[in-house]
Image (cartoon, rainbow, N blue to C red):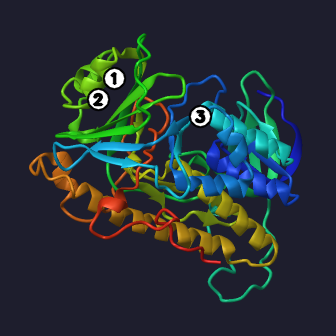
Amino acid sequence: MPTLQPPQAFDVAIAGGGPAGASCAIPLARAGLRVLLADGGSERAFRIGEGLPPPVRSLLGELGVLDRVLEDGHRPSYGTLAYWGGLAGHANDTLRQLHGNGLQLDRVRFDTALRAAASEAGCEVALATHLQCDDAEEAKASTNPSAGNGTDAAAPPSAPHRLQLRRAGAPLVQVTARWLIDASGRMATQACRLGARRRHYDRLLAFYQRLRSDSRTDQDGRTWVEAVEDGWWYSVLLPSGERVVAFLGDADQLDRRALLEHDGLWQHLQHTAHLGALCAEHGYRPHGAVQGADACSAELDRAAGERWLAVGDAALAFDPLSSKGIGNALYTGLRAAQALLAHEAGDLRAPERYADHLRDIHRVYRKQLQGFYAMETRWPDAPFWARRQAGPAVAQGAAPATSGGKAVATLPWQPAQRTATGRENHSNGIPPLPW
């Protein structure tokens, strides 16, 4: 049995060192709290590139890391070319964007920069370390007992969260924290251990692969999107010079084993009318294994409980078509930190309002997503499209399993700008803050 070292006490422990966890850690550490950020990933692991839409720059500015990110070698993203709703391509460039161009991120570099900013703010960063909550579910599952009574009277004191830190080859470490933040991604591991439940609204899966070319002739920095009968594709040019292609379809309609074979995804790409031709023009060939990942729309039934909050994909997960992945991670991380600090200052209902706010965000998002999928009418009898045009999505069971991998990259695209319901505002469709 591993030897337990003497417990360490933190004000806040954050499970997950991606953008959501780091963006929550930075303001909390700057406020003087003792913060632990436990990142279970590997610095050397490949992370699929992700689009950073121009409006998200304001969140990086709020964190104080915008200049660092802009100087860190990410590839500019100049818009989108979408083959959606017809044979003709629809270009959406960023030349007239108030916030300038987007970015195609080197995710390893981006995540490392955010963790470095957290460390500089005074946060203790534990790399390659998994944090596990040992609290019994019944001890922490209920929301703040004072929430909903219309008062800010002091709540009864609660025991700190008991946590375990696990790192390969190192002794088991026991810590405690007054607050726990779940930034563990789509699995929402810690929140579910504390009694929360995931609601899934579809069964979307993503399969992606890197491509390499010796020609280096491809300079198209736009995101390519192409609808097909059984789903849709997207592709971006990564900062490394590689191109990534991703196919998204429903778990119950796909031959997952065939797609995950060495050339399975590549062969499926050959059936596209436009993206396959782009890859052939520049001499691309597959590089590395095909990876699969959950890409469904999902949310927690509540994103806050007794001294715990969920952020990023752990709280809200979006269809990659919505372009909300990185923005959601940064936004929820920042707002969760504000809610926690408000609670510490005596506003005991701030976490509850944070959770309500996230529920509103996901409700608005699902309506927008339905409107955008409804624009593609070329295959009305195909199961993938028919189920998305049948009406509002309803919560389903557990998310479909994949062979592993990270959530697929999000698109630097604002779908609501092309729907009949009007344009999104500068907050990317996010309702105003509840405090």
Residue 115, how many percent across, how many down?
Answer: 73, 40
Locate residue 152 relative to residue 109 in the image: left or right: right
Task: Give the residue furthest to the top.
Answer: 214
Q: Amino acid at mark 3?
A: His
Camera-near label (1 vs 3) is 3
Can you identify the residue that label 3 sits on?
A: 74
Residue density around tag 3, few if under 14, some if 14–19, many if 20 or more, within 10 Å: many
Q: Is 239 above or below relative to 382?
A: above
**Quarter of the view holding residue 339:** bottom right
Residue 303, how many percent across, how many down?
Answer: 57, 63
Q: CA distance from mark 3 to mark 2?
A: 32 Å
Q: Is 47 above or below relative to 58?
A: above
Q: Amino acid at mark 1?
A: Leu
**Quarter of the view holding residue 43:** top right
Asked if the residue under mark 2 is in contact with the one under mark 1, i.e. CB atoms within 8 Å, the reply is: yes
Residue 208, how many percent across, how many down?
Answer: 39, 29
Q: Image quadrant for the C terminus?
A: bottom right
Q: CA distance from mark 1 to mark 2?
A: 6 Å
Image mark for residue 260: 1
Q: CA distance from mark 1 to mark 3?
A: 29 Å
Can you identify the residue that label 2 sits on?
A: 256
